[in-house]
Amino acid sequence: MSEQRTTPNIVLVVMDDLGYGDLSCMGNTILRTPRIDALAGDGITMRHMYATSAVCTPSRAALLTGRYPQRVGLPKVLSPEHGTGLSSFEYTLPRMLRDVGYRTAMFGKWHLGCRPEHYPTRHGFDEYAGLLYSNDMHPVELFEGEGISTADVDQATLTAAYTDHAIDFIQRHADEPFFVYLAHTMPHIPLHVEDEFTGRSAGGRYGDVVESLDHHVGRLLDTLADLGLADDTLVLVTSDNGPWFEGSTGGLRGNKLHTYDGGIRVPFVARWPGRIPAGTVSDEPACLFDLLPTLAALAGGAVPRDRPVDGMDISSVLFGGSAPRQRTLYFFHWWTLNAVRSGRWKLHLDRHPRDPNRAQGKELPQLFDLELDPAESYDLKDRHPGVLENLSALATRFEAEIAGQRPAAEARAAGRVPG
């Protein structure tokens, strides 16, 4: 057997709207996800992983750039008619990996703009196949490379088709470092699933879809094992935000659209045999924008120094240790700062969707101790005025910083300034 490589192949699987509590390894007793559960058992489960946003586009922008989506100029969900998208100014995760010799591919949902200059192949991916936006937006068109392969998409086949593309890419590049970003369309609505899984889950059609996703993750894992690549590959499975009309938040408050934890805390498991200790569970707060600097550290890449990069290298957490430092995480709705997390504390300053039956702000700000009260049920601002004051000051400074960057960020995303 050859010696394990020091830099891993990387397979990043991102579900669309999968809830924090939708995996059985996260406590679900209705849905069956044995392949992802086994992945978690062989690696790490991070129970305090956050998306930067409770909706698709900004979450994905942050994941690929390591930056708050407001800095990227993509703070809200894009529709096909929008002319904005990911700017060439942004140094993306696939560009970084390609710069250090990786072959890169993306299969699945992009949702970072649909003009040619926004295509995945213009932002670091050698290959692409998938939908450029959500499956509830029209027209539903399947792209391969930079062209439409079909405008007659059977959505029930997408999960298997994306996985087929990923397996084919891995087989073709088994002898060189590779990065696969597999961004599944499901379980975003409208829900579609192949006949093989229809009616199999006790969780209804949503459960059928999740169990299908688990099966196809298993196919990827089997491919890596068959090719002798399992020990040399870091596999990560997560979601872009919380669940929408169905799905479980695992008891967390809120869901998609909300900056309560049910909308922004996401399931996250990772495996790299021999490097990530099996059965590790971490409660260190982290964010999906940490993936760029973390994978840069593992792959020998570089993080740009000419712009703010908000993520940090959490490889120490993946390997069973502590985070290098405590930091504050900020959660926006569009350009409005809604919530701040620092350590055990979470402060809510604004809210979306706003409740039409009460005066907005009547009960705000709210301060929650997430160690004591993960469901964010009991406001402690009157008990901890010092914490309230400190987090409020941090929020004010950061919101001002983002507001100052807004004109340039919007101009880049709209293509009004070069790169």
Image: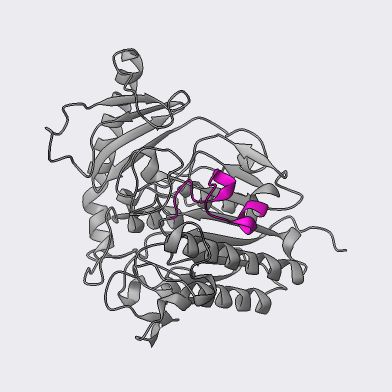
- Specify the quadrant that holds the N terminus: bottom right
Task: Please indicate whether residue 333 sits to the left or right of residue 223 in the image.
Answer: left
Task: Please indicate whether residue 356 sits to the left or right of residue 239 in the image.
Answer: left
State whether residue 170 is above or below residue 392. Answer: below
- Specify the quadrant that holds the C terminus: bottom left
Q: Position of residue 61 (x, y in %)?
A: 38, 57
Identify the residue at horizontal 37%, vertical 25% (top origin).
368
Please tell me which residue lies in front, 227 or 96: 227
Q: Position of residue 6 (x, y in %)?
A: 74, 55
- For the magenta stretch, what is the residue range? 18-38
In magenta stretch: residue 36: yes
Task: Please indicate whether residue 207 sits to the left or right of residue 135 in the image.
Answer: right
Identify the residue at horizontal 39%, vertical 87% (top origin).
150
State whether residue 4 is above or below residue 163. Answer: above
Q: Position of residue 122 (x, y in %)?
A: 42, 73
Please tell me which residue lies in front, 202 or 359: 202
Identify the residue at horizontal 25%, vertical 65% (top origin).
84
